[in-house]
Image: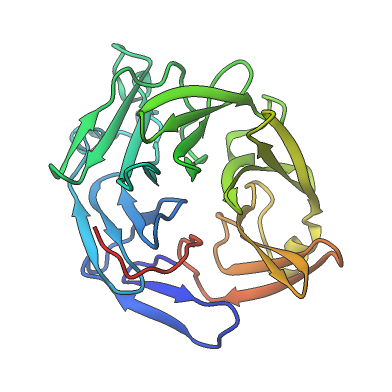
Amino acid sequence: MVSSTSLRTLVFGSLPSSSVKMPWGNETYLVCQSSVDGLVCLYDSHKPGFVVNPITGWYRPLPLSRLQERMILKDGYIELGHLNFKPGFGKDEFTGTRKPVWLYNSIDIGLENATTMCEVFDFSTNSWRYVTPSAPCRILGGFPTPVFVDGSLHWFTECEETEVLSFDLHSETFKVISKAPFASTASHWQILLCNLNNRLCDSQLKLSDQVIWSFNSLNKTWDKLWSICIVPTWRSFGFPTWYALSPLAIFVEKKKKKLLFYDPAHNHTLVLHDPETKSYDAAFSDKSIGYPVCYFPSLISI
């Protein structure tokens, strides 16, 4: 859970949480949705980022990407109507190379020479490089964040019909893998991609229900996992109603599956939901839980 001064690690099934102080001072960072080999990637649109091991406190700074440099140099970037894109973090499954990635629409940053631009960070040279050709279609900017599943990063496209765009981190090539499992009229803040049990999933807020779909990579179809009534979360935890809830993980307790999630617009509580009993419990609450990401601990570094 990323806060302004530390990384807090909550281990379910144990009483205490641990906290590792980080060297960036009283600065606030966001965290990429996906973790890789126990490492997380922290970022800010106007500051250099970090790849961090929350268990050991090891970290490696990342220099500014060209997109970030442009954001800093262009006064009133957001005020001018430019979208705030978010990076992805994943791994080449063949070589084991970890790769932070920025993908953004050219026209949305004031450029018209290409549809999109893609930057990949190279740890061997400590620099960002462009990938060509970049994505063939525009992506949704703003709230939806890229997610890493099975060697690829994934985004929603900004098309007449919303599709899922995949970036293979080994071949560094793009392809559209499927149409999204919802109507293209869904608002940007009511949909998001996530990784549950190493499956690409979509979470959509639809009136008072949270609908979660799982992508079947074999037959390229979407299977509905759950349709969850989230009215109880509004009553019990005060969650707002305009953001898609963000699933973090599926836990199995006594042969029963439980879903861990939180509300990105009201980050005070991690909630465990039992779909069988339709019950909701606060797994952890605080004045702020920061920006959560689910990961498996490791002692490795880069």
Residue placed furthest toward the left: 125
* Residue 246 drawn above or below residue 200: below
**Looking at the image, which is closer to me, 15 or 231?**
15
Instruction: Answer left or right for 273 relative to 197.
Output: right
Q: Residue at x 32, y 66 (%)?
A: 53
**Looking at the image, which is closer to me, 156 or 166?**
166
Q: How is the image coloured?
A: rainbow
Residue 187, visible in the rendered structure? yes
Quarter-of-image position of residue 129: top left
- Quadrant of image for the N terminus: bottom left
Instruction: Answer left or right for 276 relative to 168.
Output: right
* Residue 31 drawn above or below residue 19: above
Count of number-bearing discs: 0
Residue 79, visible in the rendered structure? no
Residue placed furthest toward the top: 113
Rendered location of residue 280, percent (x, y)? 76, 69
Rendered location of residue 157, percent (x, y)? 53, 25
Q: Residue at x 81, y 61 (%)?
A: 275
Rendered location of residue 199, percent (x, y)? 61, 46
Residue placed furthest toward the bottom: 15
Quarter-of-image position of residue 177: top right
Residue placed furthest toward the right: 277
Quarter-of-image position of residue 19: bottom left
Instruction: Answer left or right for 169 relative to 143.
Output: left
Rendered location of residue 291, percent (x, y)? 46, 61
**Looking at the image, which is closer to me, 207 or 16?**
16
- Quadrant of image for the C terminus: bottom left
